[in-house]
Amino acid sequence: MKSLLGKRPLIAPSMLKCDFANLHTDIARLEAANAPLLHMDVMDGHFVPNLSYGALVIEKIRKCTDLPFDAHLMISDPEKYYQDYVNAGCDAITIHIEAVPEPGELLEKIRASGCSPGLVLNPDTPVEAIKPWISACDLVLVMSVNPGFGGQKFMPVALDKLSAIKELLRDDQFLSIDGGVALDTIGECAQHGANLFVCGSSIFDKDDYSEAVSGLLAEINIKTR
Ligand SMILES: O=C(CO)[C@H](O)[C@H](O)COP(=O)(O)O
């Protein structure tokens, strides 16, 4: 993930909304659209009310592309399973503070395994909950929907959180936003400090992924120049 620092702002397609029957083709289209990384939405049907895919699938996708993988573990027991995602070839692994309220040791283990560690917080969780561990992260991910499903409406409560977290971050850390990030919301997220934007519907619901990615980047530029 460190190699991407100089390339911010980054659009990370959320691999929840992709065409699972044509993954190889979809990834080629994302590469052609200059997507700089892929966001892997791992859901266990327990921490969130939905099931997606796990390390076995990611391991296969790893063989289709050299793009970095940012794995968002929406699972109840990341301590038990994180190594599977390291072995599957993920570059960053983010864990939820709601699942691991004392994440210091696990963040260290993720870093020691060669991956970038990150923390995620849900819309109802205050910034104070992650404060003690922010410096141990390469990435902080603010959820702007309750996790579990793509296509939900952006929750503006995330904006103040972005500003508050931005104040606590070094320049070599990413500030990411996930949920309902689209043409009408991405500019404001950038104005509040986000520099890594997880986008599902705003890319995969479009026929032309290149146009979708460049349109999202253009909105960021308009709002932050
Ligand atoms: O983590 C997620 C849901 O839990 C997804 O990354 C997110 O919802 C992306 O989809 P969309 O951009 O359509 O909201």
Image: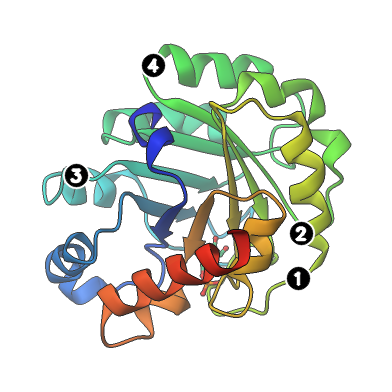
Kindly identify which residue carries mark 4.
113
Which residue appears at 30% of the width and 79% of the height?
211
Give the alpha-carbon distance from disc 4 to disc 1, as whole Å. 34 Å
Q: Earlier in the sequence, mark 4 or mark 1?
A: 4
Q: Is residue 188 above or below residue 81?
A: below
Q: Residue flagged by tag 3: what amino acid is it?
A: Arg
* Amino acid under disc 1: Met
- Indicate the amino acid at tag 4: Ser
Label 2 with label 1: CB-CB less than 8 Å: yes
**Counting other residues with Cα less than 10 Å from the Cα at mark 1, is it few (<14), some (14-19), or many (20 or more)?**
some
- The residues bearing labels 2 and 3 have C-alpha atoms spaced at a distance of 31 Å
Marks 4 and 2: in contact by CB < 8 Å? no
Hey, which residue is sitting farthest front in the picture? 225
Left or right: residue 18 versus residue 106 is: left
| Residue with the mark numbered 3 | 62
Classify mark 1: helix, strand or loop: loop
Q: Nearer the viewer, mark 4 or mark 1?
A: 1
Give the Cα separation between the discs numbered 2 and 4.
Answer: 30 Å
Q: Which residue is mark 1?
A: 155
Q: Which residue is mark 2?
A: 158
Does the image show residue 92? yes
User: Of tags 2 and 3, which is closer to the observer?
Assistant: 2
Estimate the spatial distance between the alpha carbons at disc 2 and disc 1, rounded to whole Å. 6 Å
What's the amino acid at mark 2?
Answer: Ala
Residue 103 visible, this orientation: no
